[in-house]
Image: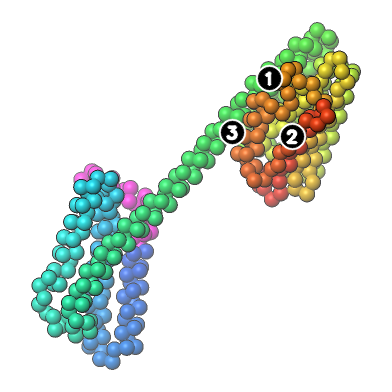
Amino acid sequence: MEKIMETIKAWLKKRSVAIFLAQIGIYLMVCATWCVVLYFTEHDPMVAIATARTNAVMFFLLLIVFMANFYVLVPYLYEDKSKLRRWLFWVVEFILIFLLNHDLFWPHGIEKLETTMHLHYYQFSIIWLVLNYVVAIAAISVRYFIHQSDLRKQLLEEKQRNAEAELAWLKNQLNPHFLFNTLNNISSLTQIDADEAQNSIGELSDLLRYALYETQQKEVLLCGEIAFMENYISLMALRCDKNVKITTHFDAPDTARTIAPMLFLSPIENAFKHGVSTGKPSFIDISLTEENGVLVFSCQNSNHPKDGCDRSGSGIGTENMRKRLELMYARRYEMNQKVEQGVYKLCIKINVKNVSST
């Protein structure tokens, strides 16, 4: 009894109620349509009423066959992977149809049936039995399509959950990476200018506050992100020599525009890591602009790799940025990077037009 109640509760929670009402609605619609047809084609009112009553009973029997299969036989026998249950399904199906249509197997009242249906008894019997099995197959098909629809919905939800989990993981990868590099910068600065290092600690505090608290949402205001990048570049520039030329250009007129937090941090870090040399002239040029709903981030820097495998555009940071772009701006971004004549060039374009913030 408890199991039956749980089944009823599960049935009520799902869309089976809507399907049940749809079945009743289809039954009433078919009966009403048949009555209208009889009204215009049958001249004898008594015959029309008898035929309508008979057809209503027949359609109701088909409805019972459909419901018995849809709610009981198909889910508990046919959908089971056991071959024995599959065979049992067809046996029970035959018994159900036999019990509901036992008059077909004992032909009494043939004359009445022929009068109301205008069909030879045996022709009608074959058609009627085939129609019963067609209804049973229809129940199997409907449940199959509903199951496939539910499965696609579950897969979509699972994919969404995985994407959100991966985004959170990538963001957690950024914060330690950012903190490690910044602390290294301040450590180097303490050996050059202690007072300036103290001021830099205050700036670092602001940066960490933004990185740890303001970036918990999926997207942040673009103006806040620009302020973060400007402060970060200013902090990174403290350890650079005079032979390093650093230029920036940020122009985003839409103050309500949003973007994924710390999205461009990795190329900025790489620019200072690979674009600065103590003995050679170096430059870093970073810009972020908006043109007709398209954000354009550009980073160019002199390329001074530490070794053959350590070069701009490679590493965990760049790969994480690429994954975040794919997860959040799939089919809405372009990313191009190349090293040309000793200069690393990166350009990222993101279509943010008509995209609501979250």
What residue is disc 2 on? Answer: 337
Q: Position of residue 137 (x, y in %)?
A: 30, 61
15 within the magenta span: yes
Which amino acid type is shown beneath numbered disc 1?
Answer: Leu
Which amino acid type is shown beneath numbered disc 3?
Answer: Leu
Q: Which mark is residue 167?
A: 3
Cα–Cα span, label 2 and label 1: 26 Å
How dense is the environment of label 3, judged by Cα within 10 Å: few (below 14), some, or many (20 and up)?
Answer: some
Which residues fall within the magenta stretch? 1-21
Comes first in the chain, label 3 or label 2: 3
Q: Position of residue 32 (x, y in %)?
A: 34, 77
Q: Is residue 201 left or right of residue 109?
A: right
Q: How many marks?
A: 3
Comes first in the chain, label 3 or label 1: 3
Which residue lies most toward the top here?
191
| Residue at the spot 65% in from the left edge and 42% down from the top edge | 329
| Residue at the spot 67% in from the left edge and 25% down from the top edge | 315
Q: Is residue 217 visible?
A: no
What residue is disc 1 on? Answer: 179
Location of residue 277 with respect to 125 vertically, above or below: above
Of tags 3 and 2, which is closer to the observer?
2
| Residue at the spot 35% in from the left edge and 78% down from the top edge | 33
Q: Quadrant of the C terminus?
A: top right
Cα–Cα span, label 3 and label 1: 19 Å
Cα–Cα span, label 3 and label 2: 23 Å
